């Protein structure tokens, strides 16, 4: 069964684009969504069904594509950047927003704003961020350790999400396994979230201490699936290919997959994922010319989204190395492409490459993006002494709502 329900939303393919700061803006979401639709068209062609174009179906979208994380405080204060982050392309079937916060009242107010002003069709809460400047203040992946605080945030957010102008908006939770191997929280947090009425839970199968190192513990996803019965459980971690996604579902019994770093520089991975979940062997294997074409389209979409070509090119720079992974380009050319300042500059640099190169195979696959080694989690002094939240910690948490993301 490939369909998974997130509240009233029925996903035609159980794949989710993970929210990533500085990556999953409207431009990149468009590329991933278009790739997913192309994958479904490829399946239809294989089956001999006419598919000159794939109609957008809000009742069964091809996957779920989540925005960059926005902090609840910034959203309530209506900062220019927060409103830019939650801006969606008119073609997005489901407007999906990830929200980060540590104060129950502020998170609840942010959710209410999103749903009563009809700014989102799905809201996800981030409890997966391992970034030290967040965790050292008690936020992100270490917050569920304070079980009462976690319960208050999730319960209040679910209640606010029911106030949507077009009906209740589904609210989901994304989390990590816990702080470290000695302070695991995911099973208890999953049960609390289910009891509170969330529409689904997603688990990045690493602890905060592991950051992005080593291998994801898929057995933890299986354990969560055994604990949470009435809502979908989504698995996240080490999905670099469509085959990995199928293997995760087979190994864990999860209802769907969340893909983050695996699609950086490879939005076409969603075509592979959609095809694989529909039983097709279709896979995208782009030549360097195909990659260059995608880079140019990404640039155009970014300019449209950002409204400033210089800023758009600065945002695109981080993607260049991911796109070119495995292709023979040369250090000097890579360096120049990492400094592009305009679309004309991008076109000139890309045109100078040997675009006749075929897909390089395994060299273009596998890990990309953030990795690094395991880190000792930074938490407030005394944070691990108790599962309860005292007044001193409550005051300190107010500083944790920073414009950062991860998880």
Image: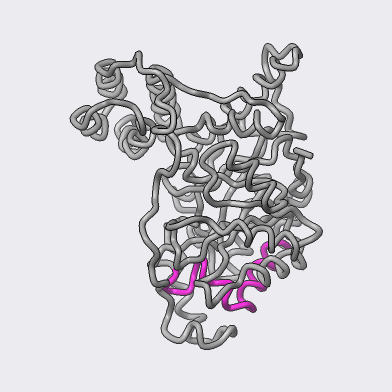
| Magenta portion: prevailing SS class | helix
- 143 vs 22, left or right, is right
Tell me which segment is drawn in magenta: 135-158
Relative to residue 102, is residue 6 depicted above or below? above
Residue 180 position in % (x across, y down): 50, 72
Residue 283 sits in quarter: top right
In this view, the residue in front, 361 or 143, is: 361
Let me know if residue 150 is in the magenta part. Answer: yes
Q: Do we see residue 350 in this rendering?
A: yes
Q: In which quarter of the image is the N terminus?
A: top right
Q: What residue appears at the point 54 percent right and 69 percent down from the top-left corner?
A: 102
In this view, the residue in front, 252 or 135, is: 252
Q: What residue appears at the point 48 percent right and 86 percent down from the top-left corner?
A: 392
Residue 273 position in % (x across, y down): 61, 34
Relative to residue 145, is residue 11 depicted above or below? above
Residue 175 sits in quarter: bottom right
Q: Do we see residue 95 in this rendering?
A: no
- 5 vs 380, left or right, is right
Residue 324 position in % (x across, y down): 35, 30
Relative to residue 396, is residue 45 depicted above or below? above
């Amino acid at each position: 069964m490939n369909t998974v329900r997130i509240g009233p939303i029925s996903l035609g393919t159980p794949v989710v684009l993970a929210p990533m700061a500085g990556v999953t803006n409207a431009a990149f979401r468009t590329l991933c969504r278009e790739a997913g639709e192309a994958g479904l068209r490829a399946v239809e062609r294989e089956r001999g069904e006419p598919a000159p174009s794939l109609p957008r179906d809000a009742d069964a979208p091809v996957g779920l594509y989540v925005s960059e994380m926005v902090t609840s405080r910034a959203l309530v204060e209506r900062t220019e950047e927060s409103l830019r982050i939650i801006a969606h392309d008119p073609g997005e079937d489901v407007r999906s927003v990830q929200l980060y916060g540590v104060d129950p009242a502020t998170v609840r107010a942010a959710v209410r704003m999103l749903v009563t002003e009809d700014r989102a069709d799905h809201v996800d809460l981030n409890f997966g961020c391992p970034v030290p400047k967040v965790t050292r203040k008690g936020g992100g992946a270490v917050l569920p350790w304070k079980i009462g605080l976690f319960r208050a945030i999730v319960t209040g957010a679910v209640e606010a999400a029911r106030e949507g102008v077009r009906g209740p908006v589904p609210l989901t939770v994304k989390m990590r396994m816990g702080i470290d191997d000695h302070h695991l929280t995911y099973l208890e947090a999953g049960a609390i979230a289910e009891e509170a009425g969330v529409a689904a839970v997603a688990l990045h199968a690493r602890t905060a201490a592991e950051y992005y190192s080593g291998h994801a513990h898929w057995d933890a996803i299986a354990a969560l699936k055994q604990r949470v019965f009435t809502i979908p459980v989504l698995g996240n971690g080490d999905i670099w290919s469509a085959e990995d996604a199928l293997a995760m579902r087979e190994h864990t019994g999860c209802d769907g997959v969340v893909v983050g770093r695996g699609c950086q520089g490879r939005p076409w991975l969603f075509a592979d994922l959609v095809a694989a979940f529909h039983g097709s062997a279709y896979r995208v294997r782009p030549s360097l010319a195909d990659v260059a074409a995608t880079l140019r389209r990404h640039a155009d979409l970014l300019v449209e989204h950002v409204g400033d070509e210089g800023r758009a090119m600065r945002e695109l720079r981080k993607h260049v190395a991911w796109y070119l992974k495995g292709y023979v380009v040369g250090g000097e050319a890579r360096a120049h492409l990492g400094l592009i300042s305009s679309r004309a500059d991008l076109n000139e640099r890309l045109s100078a490459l040997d675009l006749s190169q075929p897909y390089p195979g395994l060299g273009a696959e596998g890990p990309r993006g953030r990795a690094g080694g395991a880190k000792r989690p930074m938490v407030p002094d005394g944070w691990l002494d108790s599962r309860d939240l005292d007044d001193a910690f409550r005051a300190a948490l107010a500083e944790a709502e920073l414009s950062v993301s991860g998880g």
